[in-house]
Image (spheres, rainbow, N blue to C red):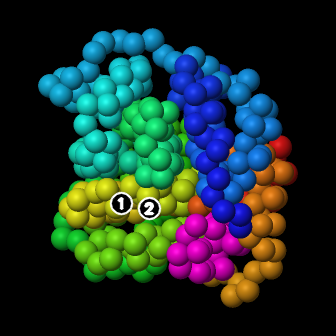
Amino acid sequence: MNPVDYSALDETLEIMAPMGPDLSNGFSNHAPMAIEAMCAMGRADAVMPWFEGYRHSLVPRHTRVGRLTNDNWRAALGDLRRTEDWFEFFRNECEERPWQSVLDDWAARLAPGLMAAATHGVIRTGHATRALALDNTPARRRELADGLAYWAADYLPLPAVRHTGARAKPSGAIARVQMIPPEMRSGNFGAFTDALAQLDSFPPFNATLDAVDTTGDPSAFLSDLTATFARVFLANAHDTYTTIAFVHAVTGPSALRPILPFLGDRTARAALAYAWQTAAAMYATFGTHADLSHPDEVKVGNQDELIERAIECGDEHAIKFTEVCLREHALKPDPAFLAAAGHAIRMLSAAT
């Protein structure tokens, strides 16, 4: 893999400054995330060619509704009309005090709604945090404000009944997550978050949040969590829809990786539990196979080949997922990560 190269990031963030968090088709604007991922993989050379093909889908920011303050923000939590109000609030916060302090305070408040925008709120925040930790520029502070705003405006808590926490790692707890039986599923949904509403009437999911033990090393927990859901991905990603759904069961939790160093211990452990719950929600809602075994050796080519294939594919999920899988594999090698990246690239290439 080439050395990280962020030479294209601030330039494209400036171009995107007038643009909102959604695309013309109503889906999430992935450009800031995919571009930061390419920079992290040392492929800044691919940014502008990719961006030129993507930017036609961008749409202007939403109209503001009203000013948010430290006294009235709770009423706007989860209100999609208020994305721009949240952006102005967080942009001011990041200019008035250290961005690290803003991130710590708001990750604690937003963690229960980590499923926001099908995890794109926390993912965008994670990419912005990694870039800011490298260089504190105005464009990157603005991008952090955009990530937090998306997380807050689309805040989406999942059903949970608190009880005594279990003493299991995600790799052990996954066997106890029940999938919604096929006969109980409501049919096809356009948005993942619409399908996840079925969990509100599926009581077995209520115990999921406390099914894992987050008291140990946070990095080790996150490695176990992402490796577990790389296996979930391999077992359950069988078409474009499920591929994209289960991509987020890995990229959503992994987005906490660059955020964790800036969080207090209590906030970090709560965020990890909600990351587990979020990934498990994808499994319970869209999963069809519980056998998570995978070959011990998977021939997927080397890492540079995976990166090149992801960029050639051009799909933003393939790019982001490949970067996450390579990052997690570098921290704790597991063939499931490389296999999952290769499978995602194949599935999403066929869909383009």
Residue drawn at point x = 77 percent, y = 55 percent? 310
Taking the spot 18% from the left edge, 28% from the top edge, the residue there is: 70
Name the magenta segment's main secondary structure: helix
Question: Horizontal and vertical percent for residue 261?
Answer: 34, 61
Residue 260, numbered circle: 1
Q: Amino acid at mark 2?
A: Arg
Badge 1 amino acid: Leu
Which residue is rendered at x = 83% and y = 51% of the image?
312
Report whether residue 26 is seen: no
Q: Is residue 337 magenta?
A: yes
State if disc 1 and disc 2 touch (CB < 8 Å). Answer: yes
- Crowd tier of the residue under label 2, counting other residues whose Cα lies within 10 Å: few below 14, some 14–19, many 20 or above: many
Residue 260, horizontal then vertical, whole percent: 35, 60
Q: 319 or 128: which is nearer to us?
A: 128
The quadrant in which residue 153 appears is: top left
Q: Is residue 146 left or right of residue 273?
A: right
Quadrant of the image containing the C terminus: top right
Which residue in the structure is indicated by mark 2? 257
Question: 128 or 312, which lies in front?
Answer: 128
What's the magenta region? Answer: 325-341
Q: At which x and y percent is residue 38?
A: 67, 51
Left or right, residue 71 beside residue 20: left
Task: Give how far apart the Cα atoms at labels 2 and 1 are.
Answer: 6 Å
User: In what element is the residue under mark 1?
Assistant: helix
What residue appears at the point 77 percent right and 67 percent down from the top-left corner?
304
Q: Between 122 and 289, which is closer to the camera in this rendering?
A: 122
